Image: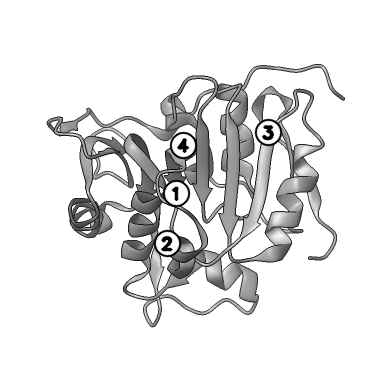
């Protein structure tokens, strides 16, 4: 972790990022898509430097957040970013691999789980020279299923599952959800009008029997919610 940079998001939410890294639209979309009530426990699975959790915490105040990632340095950035916020954020950083979640944690500890797994697959995406960046960009063919299975293990019955990914991954996401006991209840296509969707945001609920709704496609800018402004300079 070399020379992290402080980034100011809308509403003056401040986060640290690795030098040269940027806050992606996917991160803000995932953070904005979560709508919940105070007092709940929310896990950001594969949280990286925690931008999604920290941004979403301003939109969903009063919750307890847990950030899980296998990479230690981004977790340190997340905890440093927590101290930049004007309003205290109850957030814990835990270093854990996706594969060992069921061994490391008891079942049913989270009311909601949000995740933005790597889009690329090993062998199909060029390797990044930076190991930290490489882990966030690509993984094995089973990685997406491991993320979903880990989320299902953590969720309470009726708990909310929220994932953002590319449309081509939708069949895998649906299969992973069904086999893990998560019922997909809503799909939000994201992209420009009259063009194929660039991303999908899928919401599911553990153990529910709700019918699946596919929402009208929206542009990313219209779905990103603005964090309340604060006075910290």
Instruction: Report the side of 176 relative to 4 (left or right).
Output: left
Mark number displayed over residue 115:
1
Q: Earlier in the sequence, mark 3 or mark 2?
A: 3
Disc nearer the start of the sequence (4/2) = 4
Of marks 3 and 2, the one in the foreground: 2
Name the residue rendered at 47%, 78% in the picture: 126
Q: Callout 4 environment at 10 Å: few (<14), some (14 to 19), or many (20+)? A: many
Q: CA distance from mark 4 to mark 3?
A: 21 Å
Q: Which mark is residue 102?
A: 2
Q: Position of residue 125 (x, y in %)?
A: 42, 75
| Left/right of residue 4 with respect to residue 91 in the rendered view | right
**Image marks 2 and 1: residues in contact by CB distance under 8 Å:** no
The residue that disc 4 covers is 29
Please tell me which residue is depicted at 65% across the width and 75% down the height of the picture: 130
What's the CA distance linking mark 2 and mark 1? 17 Å
In this rendering, the answer to whether 200 lies above or below 208 is below
Q: Of the residues tagged 4 and 2, which is closer to the observer?
A: 2
Q: Earlier in the sequence, mark 4 or mark 3?
A: 4
Contact, mark 3 vs mark 1 (Cβ under 8 Å): no
Q: Is residue 52 left or right of residue 196?
A: right
Mark 2: secondary structure: helix
143 left or right of 209?
right
| Cα distance between the residues tagged 4 and 1 | 11 Å
């Amino acid at each position: 972790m070399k020379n992290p940079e402080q980034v100011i998001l809308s509403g003056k939410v401040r986060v640290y990022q690795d030098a040269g890294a940027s806050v992606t639209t996917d991160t803000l979309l995932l953070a904005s898509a979560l709508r919940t009530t105070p007092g709940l426990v929310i896990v950001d699975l594969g949280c990286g430097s925690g931008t999604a959790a920290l941004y979403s915490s301003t939109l969903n105040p009063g919750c307890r957040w847990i950030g899980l990632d296998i990479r230690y340095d981004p977790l340190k950035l997340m905890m440093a970013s927590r101290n930049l916020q004007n309003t205290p954020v109850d957030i814990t950083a835990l270093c854990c691999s996706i594969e060992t979640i069921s061994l490391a944690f008891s079942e049913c500890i989270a009311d909601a789980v949000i995740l933005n797994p790597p889009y690329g697959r090993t062998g199909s995406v060029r390797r990044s020279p930076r190991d930290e960046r490489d882990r966030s960009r690509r993984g094995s063919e089973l990685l997406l299923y491991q993320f979903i299975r880990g989320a299902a293990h953590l969720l309470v019955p009726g708990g909310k599952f929220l994932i953002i990914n590319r449309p081509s991954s939708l069949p895998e996401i649906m299969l992973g959800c069904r086999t893990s006991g998560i019922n997909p209840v809503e799909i939000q296509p994201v992209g420009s009008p009259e063009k194929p969707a660039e991303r999908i945001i899928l919401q599911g609920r553990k153990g529910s029997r709700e019918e699946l709704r596919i929402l009208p496609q929206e542009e990313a800018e219209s779905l990103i919610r603005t964090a309340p402004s604060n006075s910290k300079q």
